[in-house]
Image: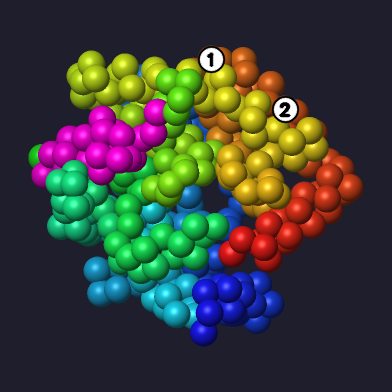
Amino acid sequence: MTRKLSYLKRIFDAYILKKDSQLSFWHGTPLINHKSLEDIGDLGEYYMPFLQKANYQALLDENLIPILDYHGTIGKQYNPIAIAQYGLGHCNIFFTDKNEKSLKIIKNVADWFVQKLEKNSYGVQVWHHYFDFEYARLLKNPWYSGLAQGQAISFLLRAFKITKDESYMNASKEAIISFKKDQIEGGVVYKDNNDFLWIEEYITNPPMHILNGFIWAWWGLYDYCLIIEDKVIQDIKGELLKTLEEKLILYDSGFWSLYDQSDKSIPNFASPFYHKLHIVQLKIMYKLTKQDVFKEMADKWESYSHSSYNKTKAFLFKVLFKLKYF
């Protein structure tokens, strides 16, 4: 089966046949956890509730670690990003009511991350995905992700706060090194020709600059700097924030948000889910940084959502992009 046919079959199974799939995990309604933003100087609940992710039951292993079913040639796989979000959801539950089941899951998930952290071919400690993934550029097994690095750090730091297990803190300190290295050195950041620094969700050449992955990963650096003194990471976090402030406008099409900065001839428009996620993320960025650019763009993109014409136009562009490049 060709790559395109394999991808289309996976999409058909998930969207048309409504089989349990990776989409059962990813596509809950993006929400702000307002409680987490009451004291942003303290590492507490995560900035999105992720309760739907914490309640994922479609496929769990014997340690209650989630497995996603991608169908097609990919099949059932562990995904570090999904596992981190699942763990963060249980951290939120535990912070609220000290739930013992959530505490057990937090420990199991944190142990999984400690055990699975390993050196990539450059000697940098990462969490690998062990399957080929059909993106606009094929991600070959094994691949790693700036988003996985950032969200796993956000989770492990909260697991450390809850359990005081030093191995979780140590894993965070090892994983953060990936943000100190360019992707050509085995890291997850990229400096462009104008000296703007980017976090890359997917390591591709040329880079894609996926917006939601950049923001979620940046929260990992934000969390890290709340409890660990690291001047280098503090400076990197500031560089990355400057990139988001200056380059956010590139993701505004004039009627909808863009998913990434693809070099393709057709822009990669965000799906309705990711458009909503962008809005939620930018509202949280405003709360964390007090930078007006994030609130202003969130409000603009929210206004786009009220137009059925905008939604339809963005959807058609998305379909064209998928058919041509996936």
On the rendered structure, is 191 left or right of 286? left
> Circle 2 sits on which residue?
299
Q: Amino acid at mark 1?
A: Lys
Image quadrant assignment for residue 111: bottom left
Tell me the quadrant of the picture where the C terminus can be found.
bottom right
Judged from the image, the secondary structure of the residue bearing numbered disc 1 is loop
Q: Position of residue 148 (x, y in %)?
A: 35, 48
Q: Residue at x 49, y 65 (%)?
A: 134
Residue in front for this viewpoint, 217 or 67: 217
Distance CA(mark 1)–CA(mark 2): 15 Å
Q: Is residue 214 magenta?
A: no
Q: In the orientation shown, which residue stands out farthest toward the bottom? A: 1
Q: Position of residue 170 (x, y in %)?
A: 13, 39
Q: Magenta segment: does it hold 185?
A: yes
Q: Is residue 198 visible?
A: yes
Task: Please give the range of residues in magenta.
Answer: 167-191
In the rendered image, the vertical position of residue 279 relative to residue 120, given as above or below? above
**Is mark 1 in CB contact (under 8 Å) with mark 2?**
no
List the residue tagged with mark 1.
290
Residue 44 makes an appearance in the image:
no
Crowdedness of circle 1 by 10 Å Cα count: few (<14), some, many (20+)?
few
Q: Quadrant of residue 66?
A: bottom left
